[in-house]
Image: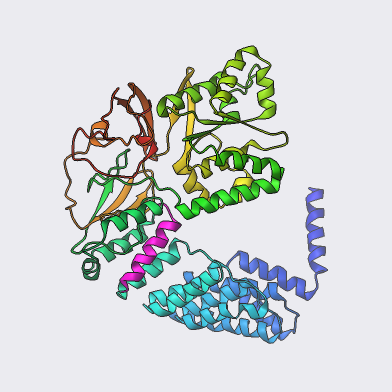
C-alpha cells in the first residue's frame, strides 16, 4: 500500500515539474489516444495563445487526428469544421517554418480529398521534393481515389504515371480504382492494361474488385470490343514466351460475354467452360535475369572461381530435368538420437526420377559430405554410380550448396526436388513475389511414408488471373473454396454435365517421358487438395491420352506427367 502511494506521489511530482511544452505534449497524446478532437483543438488554440514552441511532432499528431476523424463524421457542418481547422493547423505549421514530413503531407492530402480537391492533394505530393522527403504509396491514395471517384480518368492516369516514375508498384485497391474509372469512361485499352497489372499484383481478387470486373464484361462496350481475325500462331507464341496463362495481345473475339462463378478441378479444368488453366512459369526474359541474379549473389558470397567453374560445367551438361537438394533429402526426418544423413532416402529419389524420365537427375552435395559418406563401404556403390552417370556434383569446401542447386534449377529450367521453404534472407534478395511464382512452378516436394517415397509435383495450374489463347478469362476469387470467375464469349455458363477429375477426363503430356512406362500411382496437388491416379503401363506414341473428349493442346504441366 505504501509503495503504491509513493509511486502515485512520484507521478504527481513528475507532472508538476513538466514545462508548458511537455505538458502540452502529454495532454495532446492523451487526446489522440482517446480520439478527442475537440479537446485537441482546444489545446492547440491555447498553445498558440500562450506562444508555446510547437514542433513537427505536435503538428503531425494534430493533423493525423483530424484526417482520421473524417471517416467517422457524417454531419456536414462538423466535417466542414474539421477541414477548416485542419488546414488552419497546416498553415500554422508552414508559417512557423517547420518542414512537413511524409506523414504531414499524407494527412493534409486526406483532408483535401475529403473536399473532393484531388488537384490540391496531388500537388501536395508533387511538392514533397522541395522538403527533401520521399512519398510513400499511401501518399498518392487521396488524389488518385478522388479522380477515380469523379471519373476524371486523365488525371487519375497522371497520378499513376507519377507513382510509376517514383518506383511504386500499385496494389489491388489502386488498380481496382483505375480499372473502374477506365471501364466507366469507355477506355477499353486501359481496362485491358489494368487487368494485366492486376494479374501481376495479386493471386485472388477481392469481391469488390470482382464486381468491377464483372461489370466491365457485362457492359455493352465490353461486348463490342475485340478482334475476330487474330493470328492464332502469334497468340500461342506470346503465351509460351510469357510463361503461360496470358498473351497480352488485346481483346480477342466479339459478342456478348457470359460470366459465371465456377470451380476448377484438381487437374486445372474449369467446370463451367471446360478449358484447362495453365501452371504459369516466369517468362524467358525473367528466367534469364533470375539466373543472372542468382549467379551474381552467389559470387558475392562464394569464392568466385569456384562458382564460375560450376557455371562452365553446367553449360556443358544441360540435359537434366531434375535438380536435387541432396542434403535436404538425406537429412529428412533424421532429427533423432541415432539420426544422420540417410543415403538410401536420397538413392530412392534418384532412382525414382530416373524411372520417370529415363534420365539421371543432378544431385548437389557438399564435398565434405561425400567424403564422409564414402568412408562407409555400403555407400560407395551408390556414389560411384552417380559419378559415373554424371548425376553428382560436389560443391567445394567453404561453399553453400543452396546457390548451386538453385542456380542449376533456374539455368536449366528444370524441376527442383527439395522441401526447403527457401525463406532465408539470401532468397529474399531475389524478390518475394517473383520468387514465389518460380517456386510454385518448379519445386517438387517429397515425403517418405513407411519408407515409401512420395513426390508432390507442382500444382497443375496457377491461382492467378489467366487469359487464354481463345480470349476467355478466369479470375480467382477464393483459394480455399476454389471459386473462380469464368468469362467466356463462346459458351453458355449453364451448368454442364459433371466433369470428372479422373485420368480419363484429361490428357497426359508426355514431353519429359519415354513411351514405355509401367503402372504406378502418384499424387497430384493443388491449393484445394490431393488426388491419386493410376497410370497405364503404355501410352500411345502420339504423346497424349484422351479416353473421353477431344484432344486438346495445352502447355505441359509436371503434375500431369505419368510417374514411370
In this rendered view, identify the residue nearer to me: 60 or 169.
169
Q: Can you say whether 227 is above or below 402 in the image?
A: below
Task: Work out whether 163 lies above or below 452.
Answer: below
Quick one: 149 or 543, which is closer to the camera? 543
User: Residue sitting at 67 percent across and 38 percent down?
Assistant: 400
Report the span colored magenta: 187-204
Q: Is residue 438 above or below residue 173?
A: above
In the image, is 513 to the left or to the right of 393?
Answer: left
Q: Nearer the viewer, residue 315 or 186?
A: 315
How many circles with numbers are drawn on the protein? 0
Quadrant, the C terminus: top left
The answer to whether any part of residue 39 appears in the image is: no
Magenta span includes 229 = no
Rendering coords of residue 128 (x, y %): 61, 77
Task: Determine whether, in the image, residue 132 is placed left or right of residue 535.
Answer: right
Residue 130 % position (x, y): 65, 81
Q: Position of residue 107 (x, y in %)?
A: 57, 74
Does residue 93 appear to the left or right of 255 in the view shown? right
What colouring style does the render use?
rainbow
Tell which residue pokes out farthest to the top in this image: 377
Residue 194: image location, x then y, percent: 39, 65
**In the picture, residue 397 is in which quadrant?**
top right
- Where on the picture, by quarter, is residue 358? top left
Q: Which residue appears at 52% of the width and 71% of the height?
A: 163
Q: Is 203 one of the magenta-colored residues?
A: yes
Q: Name the chief secondary structure element in magenta.
A: helix
Residue 324, relative to residue 213: is it above or below? above
Q: Can residue 312 be seen in this snapshot?
A: yes
Q: Residue at x 74, y 84 (%)?
A: 50
Amino acid at each position: 500500500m505504501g509503495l503504491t502511494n509513493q509511486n502515485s506521489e512520484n507521478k504527481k511530482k513528475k507532472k508538476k515539474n513538466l514545462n508548458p511544452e511537455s505538458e502540452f505534449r502529454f495532454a495532446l497524446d492523451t487526446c489522440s489516444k482517446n480520439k478527442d478532437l475537440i479537446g485537441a483543438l482546444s489545446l492547440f488554440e491555447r498553445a498558440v495563445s500562450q506562444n508555446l514552441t510547437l514542433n513537427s511532432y505536435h503538428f503531425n499528431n494534430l493533423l493525423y487526428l483530424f484526417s482520421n476523424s473524417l471517416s467517422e463524421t457524417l454531419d456536414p457542418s462538423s466535417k466542414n469544421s474539421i477541414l477548416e481547422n485542419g488546414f488552419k493547423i497546416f498553415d500554422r505549421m508552414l508559417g512557423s517554418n517547420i518542414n512537413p514530413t511524409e506523414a504531414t503531407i499524407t494527412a493534409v492530402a486526406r483532408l483535401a480529398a475529403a473536399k473532393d480537391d484531388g488537384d490540391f492533394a496531388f500537388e501536395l505530393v508533387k511538392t514533397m521534393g522541395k522538403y527533401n522527403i520521399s512519398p510513400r504509396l499511401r501518399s498518392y491514395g487521396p488524389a488518385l481515389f478522388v479522380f477515380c471517384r469523379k471519373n476524371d480518368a486523365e488525371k487519375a492516369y497522371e497520378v499513376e504515371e507519377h507513382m510509376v516514375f517514383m518506383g511504386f508498384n500499385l496494389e489491388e485497391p489502386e488498380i481496382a480504382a483505375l480499372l473502374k474509372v477506365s471501364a466507366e469512361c469507355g477506355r477499353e485499352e486501359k481496362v485491358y492494361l489494368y487487368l494485366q497489372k492486376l494479374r501481376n499484383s495479386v493471386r485472388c481478387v477481392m469481391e469488390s474488385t470482382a464486381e468491377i470486373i464483372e461489370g466491365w464484361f457485362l457492359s455493352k462496350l465490353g461486348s463490342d470490343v475485340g478482334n475476330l481475325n487474330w493470328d492464332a500462331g502469334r497468340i500461342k507464341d506470346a503465351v509460351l514466351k510469357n510463361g503461360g496463362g496470358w498473351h497480352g495481345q488485346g481483346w480477342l473475339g466479339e459478342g456478348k460475354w457470359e460470366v459465371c462463378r465456377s470451380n476448377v478441378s484438381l487437374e486445372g479444368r474449369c467446370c463451367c467452360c471446360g478449358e484447362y488453366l495453365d501452371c504459369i512459369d516466369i517468362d524467358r526474359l525473367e528466367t534469364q535475369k533470375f539466373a543472372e541474379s542468382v549467379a551474381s549473389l552467389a559470387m558475392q558470397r562464394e569464392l568466385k572461381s569456384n562458382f564460375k567453374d560450376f557455371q562452365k560445367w553446367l553449360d556443358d551438361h544441360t540435359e537434366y530435368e531434375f535438380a536435387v537438394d541432396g542434403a535436404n533429402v538425406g537429412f529428412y526426418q533424421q532429427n533423432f538420437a541415432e539420426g544422420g544423413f540417410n543415403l538410401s532416402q536420397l538413392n530412392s529419389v534418384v532412382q525414382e526420377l530416373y524411372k520417370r524420365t529415363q534420365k539421371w537427375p543432378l544431385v548437389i552435395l557438399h564435398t565434405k559430405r561425400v567424403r564422409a559418406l564414402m568412408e562407409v563401404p555400403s555407400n560407395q556403390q551408390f556414389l560411384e554410380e552417380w559419378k559415373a552417370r554424371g548425376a553428382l556434383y560436389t560443391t567445394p569446401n567453404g561453399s553453400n550448396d543452396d546457390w548451386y542447386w538453385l542456380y542449376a534449377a533456374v539455368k536449366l529450367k528444370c524441376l527442383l526436388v527439395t522441401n526447403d521453404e527457401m525463406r532465408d534472407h539470401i532468397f529474399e534478395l531475389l524478390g518475394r513475389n517473383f520468387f514465389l511464382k518460380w517456386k510454385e512452378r518448379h519445386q517438387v516436394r517429397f515425403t517418405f511414408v513407411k519408407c515409401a517415397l512420395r513426390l508432390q509435383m507442382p500444382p497443375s495450374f496457377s491461382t492467378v488471373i489467366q487469359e487464354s489463347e481463345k480470349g476467355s478469362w478466369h479470375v480467382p476469387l477464393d483459394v480455399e473454396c476454389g471459386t473462380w470467375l469464368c468469362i467466356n464469349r463462346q459458351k453458355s455458363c449453364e451448368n454442364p454435365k459433371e466433369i470428372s477429375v479422373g485420368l480419363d477426363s484429361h490428357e497426359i503430356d508426355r514431353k519429359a517421358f519415354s513411351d514405355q512406362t509401367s503402372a504406378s500411382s502418384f499424387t497430384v496437388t493443388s491449393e484445394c487438395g490431393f488426388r491419386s491416379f493410376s497410370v497405364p503401363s503404355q501410352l500411345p506414341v502420339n504423346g497424349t491420352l484422351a479416353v473421353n473428349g477431344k484432344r486438346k493442346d495445352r502447355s505441359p504441366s509436371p503434375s500431369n506427367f505419368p510417374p514411370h
